[in-house]
Amino acid sequence: MTDKVKVIYFTVDGKPEQAEFRSDFPADDVKDCFRSASEAGPNDILKLYNQKGSIINISPKLEENGPDSRYRLEVVATNCDTAIAKRLGVDMSGLEARLQELETKVKVENGDTPSVVYDLRNKVECFREKLEGVEHLSWLGLFKDLVRYKGSKHFYQNGTYLKASEADLKRVWEKFKKMSNVQLTTEVREYLRQPSFDNWQWEDAEMLVLLQQMYIDLDFVSKFHIEIPVLQTFLFEVYKHYNNVPFHNFKHCFCVCQMMYGISWLTDLCSLIGDIDVMIMITATICHDLDHPGYNNAYQVNAKTELALRYNDISPLENHHCAVAFEILEKPHCNIFKNIGPERYKRVREGMIKTILATDMARHNEILSEFKSIRDNIDYSNKKHKDLLMMICIKVSDISNEARPMDVSDPWIDCLLTEFFNQGDIEKLQGLPVAPFMDREKTTKPSSQVGFIGFVLLPLFETLAALFPVLDEHIVEPVRKALKYYTDMVKALEEEKKRKEERQENGENMVKNGEATKMRKLSQTNGSVTSQVEAK
Ligand code: LUO
Ligand code: ZN
C-alpha cells in the first residue's frame, strides 16, 4: 500500500511555496523537492525552520503542516570568502559552526523523541551536511549530485581534512628542500635498508628525504639520468596526493616502499632482475595507494561510487592509484623517467601498472598460486616469471606491517582497524553489506590478526622466503612471533571471559542459594508461625 501524498507548506525568501511527496520517498528526492522549489543549486545547503524558529530535518518523515503554519526554508550558499577556500571549495569552519548550531537546535526541537533516535538522526544529518559539496564523496556514493568543485576541500568522515592545508604543504616542502641538501649519515642509510625500520620516529619531510636517498643509493639517479629537482617535485607531488586517512596515508606509502627497498638489498634484487625492474617496484610502491579515500573496493562497488562506475568495478581503487601516478609523471617537472627514452618508459609504465594493480587483495589467491607454480624453477630471463616475482614482492611489502618490531607494527593495526571500522559504520548507516573484519561489533584486533597472519600473511611470506631464504630471518620470523603473540592474547582473553562467566554463574548461584536459604528460613519461620496459629 503506497503512503498518501503529504503536502508541506513553506516560504523561501518570503515567497509561499509548497512541496508534495510521500513518506516512502528516498531522502535525496525529498531534498531535491525542496531544492527545486527554492531554485537552490547543488552547492547550496538547505535549512528548514519550523514556526518556533528551530531547525527541522528535511526528510520523508517531515511532519505535515498547513498554509497557515508554514515552515521557513533558508538556502545557505557555501561561503568561499578566502582565496584558499575559493580554490579549494567549501569554507569548512563556517559550515562547522552552522552544524554546531544545527545540532543544538535540533536537540531542543524534538524533546519527546527518544534521544537515541535523535542522536542517530543528528549524526546522519550532521554527517550528510558535513560531507555535502565535497567532490570525492561521489566515490563514497553518499551524494550522487555532489558539487563539482575542482580540487575541493576534502575531508574524512570524522571531520579531519582529507588533504593537507596549503600552509602545511608549504612547510613540508621547505623543510624537505632544506634537508635534502644535507648528506645523510652512513648509519641512517644503513638503517634505512632494515625491515625493522621504525617509521614513527620520522616526520613527513624527513621521509621524503629518505625516499630520495633510496633512488640515490640504488644508483637510479645516475643510471637513469634522474635530475634531483625533478625527483624532489615528483616525490612532493606524490606526497600531496596521499590523503589524511587513518591507514592508507603517506606514512603507509613510505613503509611499503621502505620494505621493498629492504627486500631489494637483502636479496640483491638488482643483480637478479636488473635495475629498471627494481626501479619499477620502488616507484610502484611509492605510488601504489595514491589518493586512497579510506574506503575499499567493496565499498566503491556496493555504493556505486564514481570510481566504481569509471572502472566498471574492476579494481577501482588500484586503477585510480595508478592513473594518479601517471597524471603526476605526465607533468614535465615531475617526470623522473623523462631521460630513459620511449622504449624503457613504455616498459616502466607497463611494469608499474602491473604491480600496482596486483595490490588488489581480491586477486591474492590468483597471484600467489600462479607464482607458486613457477617458483621452484623460476627463470629470471622469462618475463612472465619476473612479472610474477615483482607482483609478489609488492604484495609482500604492502601488507608487511607485522614483519616489523611490535612497537612499530602495533600502531599500524590500530590505524587499519580505525579505517576499516569507520567504513563499517558508514556501510551500516547506508544499509550496505559490511565485511566481518570491518564490523567493530564482530572483530577484535587479536582475533582478526590471528586469522590474517595465519591464513594470508605467513603463507605469502613463506612462499617468497622459499625463493630467498635470507628473508626467513628478517621478515618471516617476526611474523611468526606476531602470530604467537596474538594467539596467546586470544587464549588469555578467552580464559578471562570463561573465568568471568564462572564468577557470574557462581554469583548467581550464590544469590540463588542465598535466596533458597532465605526462603527456607522464611518457610521454617512461617511453618512455625503456621503451626503456632494452628495450635491456637
Ligand atoms: C590485507 C589488507 C587489505 C587492505 C588493507 C590492509 C590490509 N592489511 C591488513 N589486514 N595490511 C596489513 C594487514 C594486517 O596486518 N592485518 C589485516 N587484518 C585484518 C583486518 C584482515 O582480515 N584484513 C583483510 C583480510 C583479507 C582481505 O581481503 C581478502 C582484506 C583485508
Ligand atoms: Zn597499500
Image: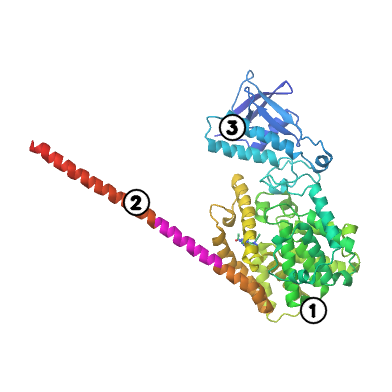
Tell which of 316 and 233 is nearer to you: 233
Q: Is residue 329 visible?
A: no
Q: Quadrant of the N terminus?
A: top right
Residue at the spot 78% in from the left edge and 60% down from the top edge: 206
Query: In the rendered image of this protein, does residue 334 appear above or below residue 528?
Result: below
The residue beneath circle 2 is: 508
Residue at the spot 62% in from the left edge and 68% down from the top edge: 457
| Amino acid found under the numbered disc labelled 3 | Lys
Residue at the spot 54% in from the left edge and 38% down from the top edge: 116
| Residue 502 position within the rendered picture, expressed as x and y whole percent measured from the top left | 38, 57
Q: Nearer the viewer, mark 2 or mark 3?
A: 2
Write the start and end of the magenta stretch as one range: 485-501
Query: In the rendered image of this protein, does residue 383 appear above or below residue 21?
Result: below
Residue at the spot 65% in from the left edge and 60% down from the top edge: 412
Specify few, some or many for label 1: CA neighbours under 10 Å numbering under 14, 14-19, or 20 or more: few
Q: CA distance from mark 1 to mark 2?
A: 70 Å
C-beta proximity under 8 Å, tags 2 and 3: no
Residue 492 lies within the magenta run: yes
Image disc number at residue 271 = 1
Residue 12 lies left or right of residue 532; in this view the side is: right
Q: Secondary structure at mark 2?
A: helix
Residue lying farthest to the bottom in this orientation = 377
| Residue 188 position within the rendered picture, expressed as x and y whole percent measured from the top left | 76, 68
Q: Is residue 376 visible?
A: yes
Specify few, some or many for label 3: CA neighbours under 10 Å numbering under 14, 14-19, or 20 or more: many
| Residue 403 position within the rendered picture, expressed as x and y whole percent measured from the top left | 65, 68
Residue lying farthest to the left in this orientation = 535
The residue beneath circle 3 is: 107
| Amino acid found under the numbered disc labelled 2 | Glu
Q: CA distance from mark 2 to mark 3?
A: 41 Å
Ligand 2 contact, mark 1 (Cβ < 8 Å): no
